[in-house]
Image (cartoon, rainbow, N blue to C red):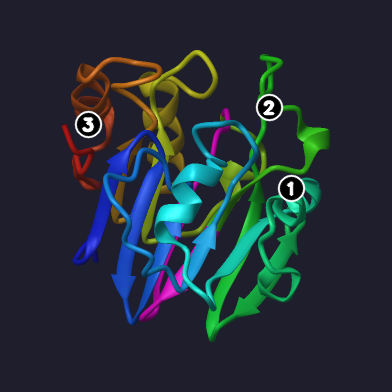
Amino acid sequence: MLENIEVLIQSSIRISKGKMIYFDPFKIDKNYNDADIIFITHDHYDHYSENDIDKVIKQDTVIIAPEELLTKLLKKGYKKDYIVTVEPEKSYMVEGIKFETVPAYNVDKPFHPKENGWVGYIIELDGIRYYIAGDTDITEESKKVKCDVAFVPVGGTFTMDYKEAANLINEIKPKIAVPIHYGSIVGTKEDGINFSKLVNPEIECEILMKE
């Protein structure tokens, strides 16, 4: 289920399964310009980075982002015909790929207000449902997620910490859990290991974060 999937840094994920897909490209190491689709979860600099989008975008790349980001995307010069704006709790089909949006927000912290309409994504590839949570706490919506693979933030401060993330994973019970959003801007490199120790043994935990 994790073949051809990379966690690059922070919440930056690259998936090559039929199409080249990026989530929140950040600190991309060189110009690839190979993206078919770029998913953006919200507009914080480590998730919406125009410099890094420029390193992966090509002529016909589709950018998928919350409605709030449309003005920034157009101001930067990205082509309107290749931008798809999304709202929380909706289903979409883009470039033959089905995906859903899950609200991503803080419950008791101010950094990611629910009213901003920021999202995580559940994307379906080859019959497998991948949940990329975005920057979120445990929420009523996240507890209802049905997925095979879950990428969840574990670094704390702005999102769940590793204990909370493990609690969420143990509740939604994916087949595989992958920790993200730790070890650089927030959290320590040990957070991924500590998370894996708290995940129920029947759930496979994979550390994909590049050093």
Spatial separation of the CA atoms under disc 1 and disc 2 = 14 Å
Image point (67%, 38%), residue name: 140
Q: Name the amino acid, label 1.
A: Leu
Which residue has dot 3 on it? 196
Q: How many marks?
A: 3
Which residue has dot 1 on it? 69
Which residue has dot 2 on it? 112
Q: Secondary structure at mark 2?
A: loop
Image point (40%, 54%), residue name: 55
Magenta-drawn segment: 122-137
- Residue 115 at what x, y percent from top left? 83, 35
Q: Name the amino acid, label 3.
A: Ser
Q: Are marks 1 and 3 in contact (CB under 8 Å)?
A: no
Q: Secondary structure at mark 1?
A: helix
Split into 4 quadrants, where in the image is the N terminus?
bottom left
> Of marks 1 and 2, which one's residue comes earlier in the chain?
1
Q: Does the magenta run of residues contain 133? A: yes
> Of marks 2 and 3, which one's residue comes earlier in the chain?
2
Left or right? Give the position of 80 relative to 49. Answer: right
Q: Quadrant of residue 2?
A: bottom left
Q: Foreground residue, 57 or 179? A: 57
59 above or below 103?
below
Crowding around mark 2 (Cα neighbors within 10 Å: few <14, some 14 to 19, many 20+) is: many
Foreground tag (1 vs 2): 1
Spatial separation of the CA atoms under disc 2 and disc 3 = 25 Å
Image point (62%, 62%), residue name: 64
- Residue 60 at what x, y percent from top left? 54, 78
Q: Are marks 1 and 2 in contact (CB under 8 Å)?
A: no
